[in-house]
Image: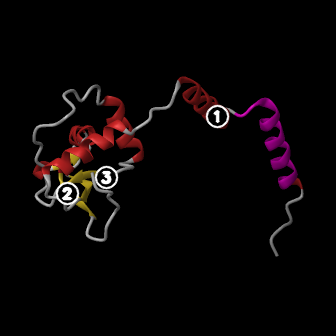
Amino acid sequence: MKKRTERAEDVIIQADVKGILIRKRVRRSLGDLAPLAESLRKHGLLNPIVITPKHELIAGHRRLEAARRLGWQTIPARIVTETDRIELIELELDENIHRKNLNTDELADAYIRLDKMRNPGILIRFWNWLANLFRRIFRRPPR
């Protein structure tokens, strides 16, 4: 496989969701799309799907289906210009093979950090209360 880098002719467009062609895929099961759809609803699409100039889907089938379920009319899509069918299948495989999911410890650490940010401890809440009190007490009237 030749080395591929993002090239100037690769562009990102807003593709019509209904116009994207889905041919035979490597992945047979899309799994539960509800969490992905909720993520798209909450945060938007972080990584565009990948299509050919003829709007044939190369990568991002789950993202596309989740967007369809949300009723999106368009979706960000990166157009790649390869015409070699072998390379297109390699791109589809690479997107799924080289992804590394977080392990249990990494997930636990991330959720603990998030919980601490959402629910600061008593000392932090007291410090913030005290700081706000001093700001109100020593606030100078506008000139």
The image quarter in which residue 4 lies: bottom left
**Residue 98 quadrant:** top left
Name the N-terminal-most of marks 1 and 3.
3
Residue 107 lies, with reference to residue 63, above or below; the image says: above
Q: Nearer the viewer, residue 71 or 19?
A: 19
Q: Is residue 53 left or right of residue 95?
A: left
Q: Amino acid at mark 1?
A: Arg
Please say whether residue 123 is one of the residues in the magenta stretch. Answer: yes
Q: Which numbered mark, 2 or 3, is in the foreground of this view?
A: 3
Q: Which mark is residue 48?
A: 3
Badge 3 amino acid: Pro
Q: Which residue is mark 1?
A: 113
Spatial separation of the CA atoms under disc 1 and disc 3: 28 Å
User: Residue, x 31% and y 71% (percent of image)?
Assistant: 8
Give the magenta range: 120-136
* Residue lying at the far front of the rendered structure: 1
Residue topped by disc 2: 15
Q: Where is residue 50 drawn, in percent x and y?
A: 25, 52
> Helix, strand, or loop for circle 3?
loop
Image quarter hosting the C terminus: bottom right
Q: Position of residue 76 (x, y in %)?
A: 28, 55
